[in-house]
């Protein structure tokens, strides 16, 4: 999340400058707290999937977890290179690029997973609407829960799509279309979405 804000500071100017120095300083400090974070990705990889999940979505989900864990693992070497502990700059740049490709792959997998889950939710909501056609569906707790889940997954789908474009921009796979300014602006929007997703759910007001 914060990484995208730092990319915004650097790319919003479209060229190196003071914002780039901010990016280098803050990213080094941030990555100290990301050491061994790839273990969380490995834990998600070996965790069982919810029953009833289609095999295709299961494989996509596990691929996403594996790619995220690989990205975070390789990112440790990038951090070592930036701190000067690992001094092979050419290899550090190569590892950094491979890690970004892993992140790109994970965002694509996330996009496909969210599309599949939204299709399943849509079918489930339509079935429930048929059962509740003679009553107010918005008073049904299960319907409201499914609707909220659908909205959350839609937002996650939007964020995954934005992150995919950001990864393409960082890798400079389409430099004429995904310019540094576009990459920075989309990274900033992705960070705002992440902040919103971290907000606690609104508390229900108690009626006397």
Image: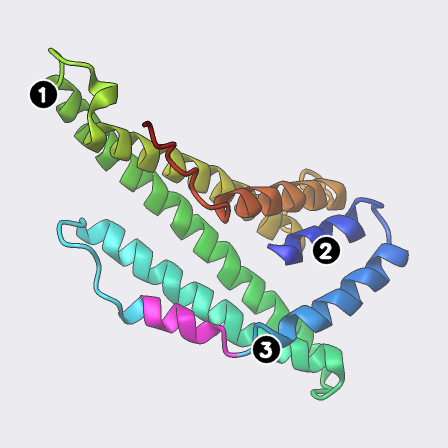
Name the one closer to the observer, 92 or 149.
Answer: 149
Residue at point 39% right, 38% down? Answer: 152
> Foreground mark, 3 or 2?
2
Is most of the magenta stretch helix, strand or loop? helix
- Judged from the image, the secondary structure of the residue bearing numbered disc 2 is helix
Residue under pointer 2: 6
The residue that mark 3 highlights is 76
Q: Is residue 164 left or right of residue 94?
A: left
Residue 81 screen position, x and y as percent: 70, 80
In this view, the residue farthest toward the front is: 208
Helix or strand or loop: what does disc 1 sit on? helix
Q: Position of residue 6 (x, y in %)?
A: 72, 55
Quarter holding residue 150: top left
Give the residue number, with chain letter if any, for mark 1.
131
**Element at badge 3?**
helix
Residue sitting at x 51%, y 68%? 71
Image location (x, y in percent) of residue 15: 86, 51
Between tags 3 and 1, which lies in front? 1
Magenta residue span:
36-44
CA gap between label 3 and label 1 equals 52 Å
Q: Is residue 195 above or below residue 6?
A: above
Across the whole image, how many numbered discs are drawn on residues? Answer: 3
Q: Please tell me whether residue 42 belongs to the stretch shown in magenta.
A: yes
Q: Nearer the viewer, mark 1 or mark 2?
A: 1
Q: Quadrant of the C terminus?
A: top left
Left or right side of 133 for 36: right
Residue 149 lies in the magenta-colored region: no
């Amino acid at each position: 999340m914060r990484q995208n804000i730092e990319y915004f500071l650097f790319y919003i100017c479209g060229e190196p400058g003071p914002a780039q120095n901010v990016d280098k300083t803050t990213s080094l400090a941030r990555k100290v707290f990301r050491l061994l974070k790839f273990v969380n990705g490995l834990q998600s990889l070996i965790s069982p999937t919810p029953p009833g999940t289609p095999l295709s979505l299961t494989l996509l989900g596990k691929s996403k977890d594996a790619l995220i864990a690989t990205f975070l693992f390789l990112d440790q070497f990038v951090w070592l290179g930036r701190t000067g502990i690992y001094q092979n700059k050419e290899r550090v740049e190569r590892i950094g690029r491979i890690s970004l490709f892993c992140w790109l792959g994970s965002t694509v997998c996330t996009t496909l997973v969210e599309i599949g889950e939204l299709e399943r939710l849509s079918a489930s909501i339509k079935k429930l609407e048929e059962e509740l056609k003679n009553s107010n569906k918005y008073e049904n707790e299960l319907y409201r829960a499914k609707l909220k889940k659908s909205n959350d997954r839609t937002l996650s789908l939007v964020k995954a799509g934005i992150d995919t474009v950001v990864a393409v921009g960082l890798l400079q796979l389409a430099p004429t279309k995904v310019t540094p300014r576009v990459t920075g602006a989309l990274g900033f929007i992705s960070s705002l979405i992440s902040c919103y997703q971290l907000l606690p759910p609104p508390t229900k007001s108690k009626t006397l």
